[in-house]
Amino acid sequence: MRLLRAGRWITGIALLLLAGVYVRALAYTPMERMQGMAQKIFYLHVPAAIWAETAMILVGLASVFYLFLKDPRLDRFAAASAEVGTVFACVILTTGPIWGKPIWGTWWSWDARLTLTLFLFLLYMGYMLLRGAVSDPGERARFAAVLGICGMVLVPFIHFSVYMFRTLHPMPIVLKPSTPSLPPVMLATWLMSLGVFSLLYVGFVIQRYALSYLREQLEAAGEARNA
Amino acid sequence: MRLPEPLRHTWAVASKDLLIEFRSRTAIISAAMFVVLVLLVFTFARDPTAVAAIDLAPSILWVTLTFAAVLALNRAFQLELENQALDGLLLAPIGRSSIYLGKLIANLLFVGTVELIGVPLLALFFNISVWPYAAPLALVIVLATVGFVSVGTLFSAMTVRTRVSELLLAVLVLPFMIPPLMWAARATGPLLAGRPLSDITGWLKMLAAYDIVFVGLALLLFPATVNE
């Protein structure tokens, strides 16, 4: 199947480039004065965070359109995006504490941003559990869409309550209204990493999409033979 | 004066559920017993010499109400599973939103009753004076309850038709309950400590916004959970 092969190629290239980003981040990007080696995690952590949140929004949007159009492709995309989002949420939740221990002195704090990520992870898990618990494909797609939309709406609520707490988390230094306060070399490395993560997202999603398409074909074939 | 038609339909659905509840009374008594038992668990799991009751009271209140609500939420659509009652309800010439609102009202009254039992018991068991703050506390509880019951009612319409309905509902709805629960607990603390109402308006606004958004969203999404 062409789509699956394309997905594999994109993922393969992205993984190679990811190795390149590692090399650049470790060897060719200057050390941050205050945080030292620990700051290197920033190049993985932030792009993964951006894509984990974007994936949730894409799940929600695909769900909205699914409820109007009832196109199974949208449902397949939402499912694929949720799975990839889960993986990225795991990346944030593992790299975050590794950075937090030397810098904050604690693996975990109930900081607003950490909480948001954890919620994102829980929403993704719930979404996939619900998909797994419903056997009828049409019903599964509708239920998942309802949950996906609710999840998308919940995220800004957690985001708002973020500002009502004191926070330990570094404030955004790249995605902020004024110009990024990052040295150009670091910014370049970070942007490359963001590009690589975008490519990874696309590659993973295409693969998952193609796999769920194949699975549906198999199920349909099995039902046709049983009938 | 006659109420507009959708409202009458809503009330018909709600009163049907409440009547079933009132006739058997098993669910409400179980839920009330559950609240009593959870409060007892907290009583005995707490070292009274280490932590003052007033510091712990908001947490105990909200943990108890959350678990009671999760257990209660399953009931609304569980009722409709027997004899394909849901199909009958869907075939009735009433709007989908009336069905959802009816279920929501029945659930709110059910959870509200449980809360009416739970709060005085909390005051009794932990020797906290609740009476002087009754009105603002009721406001916080109502705002939080509307928020998470609206989401829970929507989700329970989906989970009842899955294999592990009770557990799945809890897993799905708890992430949605935690934000209002957190705001409510933050509001309850200063309230019970005798602080003025102006200290907690921020939390009350968040709760109200959550209620409006999720009741509206659930009304829009509910048809997708029942339509074939």
Image (cartoon, rainbow, N blue to C red):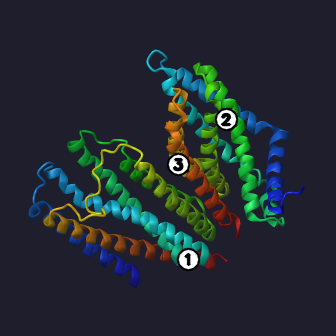
Rendered image quadrant of residue B117: top right
Q: Quadrant of residue A181?
A: bottom left
User: Hey, what amino acid is under mark 1?
Assistant: Pro
Q: Tag 2, which chain?
A: B
Going from N to C along the chain, the mark reached first, 3 or 2, is 2
Q: Dot 3: few (<14), some (14–19), or many (≥20) neighbours within 10 Å?
A: some
- State the quadrant of the C terminus of chain A: bottom right
- What residue sits 79% from the left and 56% below the top? B10
Q: Amino acid at mark 2?
A: Glu
Q: Both on one chain, marks 3 and 2?
A: yes
Q: Is residue A200 above or below residue B14?
A: below
Indicate the secondary structure of the residue bearing disc 3: helix
**Which residue was labeled with disc 3?**
B206
Tell me where residue B125 appears, x and y as whole percent.
61, 20
Circle 1/circle 3 CB separation < 8 Å: no
Which numbered mark, 3 or 2, is in the foreground of this view?
A: 3
Q: Nearer the viewer, mark 1 or mark 3?
A: 3
Horizontally, is A48 left or right of B20 in the view?
A: left
How far apart, in angstroms, are the residues tagged by discs 3 and 2? 21 Å
What residue is disc 2 on? B115
Question: Residue A72, labelled with which disc?
Answer: 1
Task: Count residues near mark 1 (Cα–Cα under 10 Å), then give few for <14, some for 14-19, many for 20+.
Answer: some
Q: Secondary structure at mark 1?
A: helix
Any part of residue A53 in sight: yes
Q: CA distance from mark 1 to mark 3?
A: 36 Å
What percent of the width, then of the height, locates residue B213? 58, 57
